[in-house]
Image (cartoon, rainbow, N blue to C red):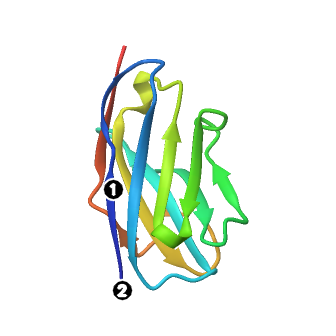
Amino acid sequence: QVDLAESGGGLVQAGGSLKLSCAVSGRTSSYFTVAWFRQSPGNEREFAAMITWDNLYRSYTESVKDRFTISIDGPKNMVYLQMNSLKPEDTAIYYCAAKYGAYTASRSAYPYWGPGTQVTVSS
């Protein structure tokens, strides 16, 4: 069993920054992937970024590449999402998700989810 808890959301002006945190509890391994997804009103939950627990692989969706950075602190069981140059279209609930096995951007492959944290970017 894996439990996830996000924090760090809030209200920020366009061009600003926020750092989201995901606390991971439970059994992890090198074959463990943590991802950030986001969902804005009226839209599907979409992939934003992911990282493998061994820190050897990271991936981003095109719309956040060069603005967002995902990182991991294994000893602390924490995964972070540094978000810079935020845009109003980044407004969404951000979810941390985790899975064992091969990394993937497919939402349906992730069985473990946190409750989410709201990010609002004002123009």
Quadrant in the picture for residue 55: bottom right
Q: Label 2 is placed on what type of residue?
A: Gln
Image location of residue 6, percent across then percent down: 33, 56
Callout 1 crowding tier (Cα within 10 Å): few <14, some 14–19, many ≥20: many
Image coords of residue 36 (percent x, y): 47, 54
User: What is the secondary structure assignment of the residue under circle 1?
Assistant: strand
Neighbor class of circle 2 (other Cα within 10 Å; few <14, some 14-19, many 20+) is few
Q: Which residue is located at x 66 percent, y 34 percent?
A: 66
Q: Could you tell whether 67 is left or right of 8 in the image?
A: right
Residue at 60% over, 71% down:
53
Q: Would you say 32 lies left or right of 36 here?
A: right
Q: Which residue is mark 2?
A: 1
**First along the sequence among labels 2 and 1:** 2
Spot occupied by residue 122 in the image (x, y as percentages of width and height): 33, 19
Is any atom of residue 105 visible in this view? no
Q: Is residue 80 left or right of residue 26?
A: right
Which residue reaches farthest front? 75
Q: Position of residue 60 (x, y in %)?
A: 63, 48
Residue type, mark 1 in image: Glu
Residue that label 1 marks? 6
Q: Residue furthest right?
A: 56
Residue 94: tell me if it is visible: yes
Which residue occupies the foreground of this view, 57 or 46?
57
Q: Residue at x 65, y 39 (%)?
A: 62
Q: Is residue 60 above or below residue 96?
A: above
Q: Residue furthest top?
A: 123
Q: The N terminus lies in which quarter of the figure?
A: bottom left
Q: CA distance from mark 2 to mark 1?
A: 17 Å
